[in-house]
Amino acid sequence: MATFDARQKELYERFTGIQGDLRFDHVTAFIFALQEHARQRDEALRTLADLAASHDESPKHPDFASKLDALSRSVVSVLNNMLDHVDQPSLKAMKYRDQAVVEEARFWATLKALAPAADRDEQMVRSHNLEFSALVLRSKWDNLSGTEKVLLEKERYYAEQMRQALKAAMEESVAAYMQAARAVVDFSSGVDQLKSQINNHFSEFVRTLAEKQKVDATIPEYIASQLKPGSQLATGLFLIIGKLSIPVAAAAKGVNALASLMRPYVERAYATAAAEMQRTQIGSLQVGFEFSETRKQADEYLRTSGWDGAKEQYAASHAAIDRWSGDQMTSALSAEAEAFGKMADIGPAFWLEMTRIHHESLLRDFGGIFFGDLSSAARDQLSNERFLIDWKSSLDSQDFDGKLRDLRDQVQRLSGDVEVAFGRIDTFSDLPFEARALIQGQVNDAKDGITRPLTVEMQEALRAMDSVRERPVKDKTMEIIESMNKQRESLARH
């Protein structure tokens, strides 16, 4: 423990130099005053040093300042009043007193200007602020990462909805196409049977008619007269040909299903999920902006008010104490100033150490988040970068556009298949020429009516597939990928 007896010794030694010139009553007054001064001075310095050295979590400078005023006034007044009860003090006695008062008053005045308790309080505030900053950053990170976690979960959900929408659109559309294709196959496979039915119908009609009319049924002129539109034979043939409308209608129904499925799945399911996903990305960008601002604020705080600032302040206060102790009027006052500085330094040193602990804890807890390069773990918590890259690869692997293109080609081939099938009806080699010509005319008349619905539905399906390929899937997917890239670039700048 530091001792404060150098000043007392100094004043006693100086007193012995004039003691021989003083009356006994003067000597007694001096000794009493010096003893009282030493006692009060020691008490004052220890009291003030304890305040500056305090580990207590409350400001000490106000108490230090008020006590310093009161104690220093009392200490100086003891010296100033040491001759009050001495009659006609000598010039040496007054000079002794005046010199001691000036030295003492300057000591306390410079200590007041030094304000070591204020430095101690500022170090304490820095430590508390750093500790509080850790709590604030923890709260902000929990809030940001928690908010982003919800957004990222939504983003993953809607991304999966988009992927499933494409998958379902393709699966359902392929199923609809297969329904149409099977109907066309049924149509094509029934053509030969239909031709046989036409041949049989013609032969039976002519035979029956020949028996009734007793005429040669093979006479071309007669056949021609019986195959005119509206005749019994022509009507029967038309009914047989009309059977073709059943499988072709089934094909049209399948193609219609393909067209009606494509838009709801992609224009609604896919586009809706994409819109929701983009909303979450807007929220994520806002989180990223707040995160960036927090990083800037945290970095600025550490640079100006954190550990570096605390060390600079501590060094400055140390230098000030050294200057204060070296600038005293006597060696004894300098020695006691140095001893006081060591005692008072306990407080600032303690709070400086607490600041260091909080600083290291802050860097340990938030390094790679708010300080230093952004860690991959923090990046993962703030973005779906890896997920979205995998998601895009998943979309690419589905090759929705390629499959849609193939499906479009297949739909177009359905029309060709029907055309080929109708072409197979063109030849009825077993019938007379006149009959073939008439039947071909009926086939041509029936063809437009039978195939028109299929043609209309196919065109609608093709338009649906083209519109899906041209905008919703490509554009929405690219918008999301561009948004992801912006978020990634924003995080990369940290």
Image: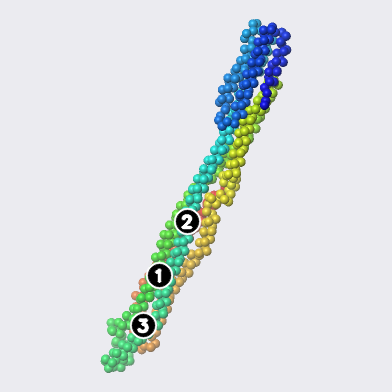
Q: Can residue 34 be seen in this view?
A: yes
Residue lying at 67% horizontally and 22% vertically, measured from the top left:
4
Q: Mark 3 and mark 2 in contact (Cβ < 8 Å)?
A: no
Residue lying at 46% horizontally and 52% vertically, measured from the top left:
279
As helix, strand or loop, the secondary structure at mark 3 comes to helix
As helix, strand or loop, the secondary structure at mark 1 comes to helix
Q: Which of 127 and 279 is in front in this view?
A: 127
Q: Looking at the image, is mark 1 or mark 3 nearer the viewer?
A: 1
Q: Where is residue 399 in the image (x, y as percent from the top left)?
A: 50, 65
Q: What residue type is labelled 3?
A: Gln
Q: Which of 25 and 422 is in front in this view?
A: 25
Q: Where is residue 208 in the image (x, y as percent from the top left)?
A: 29, 90
Q: Which amino acid does label 1 sit on?
A: Val
**Mark 1 nearby-residue class (10 Å; few <14, some 14–19, many ≥20):** many
Task: Specify the quadrant of the image occupied by residue 415.
Answer: bottom left
Q: Looking at the image, is mark 2 or mark 1 nearer the viewer?
A: 2
Q: Which of the labelled discs sits on residue 255, or is there none? A: 1
Q: In which quarter of the image is the N terminus?
A: top right
Q: Earlier in the sequence, mark 2 or mark 1?
A: 2
Q: Is residue 84 above or below residue 394?
A: above
Estimate the spatial distance between the alpha carbons at disc 1 and disc 3, rounded to whole Å: 28 Å
Q: Position of residue 12 (x, y in %)?
A: 70, 15
Q: In the visual, does 392 lie left or right of 338?
A: left
Q: Is residue 336 above or below residue 87?
A: below
Kindly identify which residue carries mark 3: 440
Q: Which of marks 2 and 3 is nearer the N terminus?
A: 2
Q: What residue type is labelled 2?
A: Tyr
Q: Position of residue 444 (x, y in %)?
A: 36, 79
Kindly identify which residue carries mark 2: 157
Q: Earlier in the sequence, mark 1 or mark 3?
A: 1
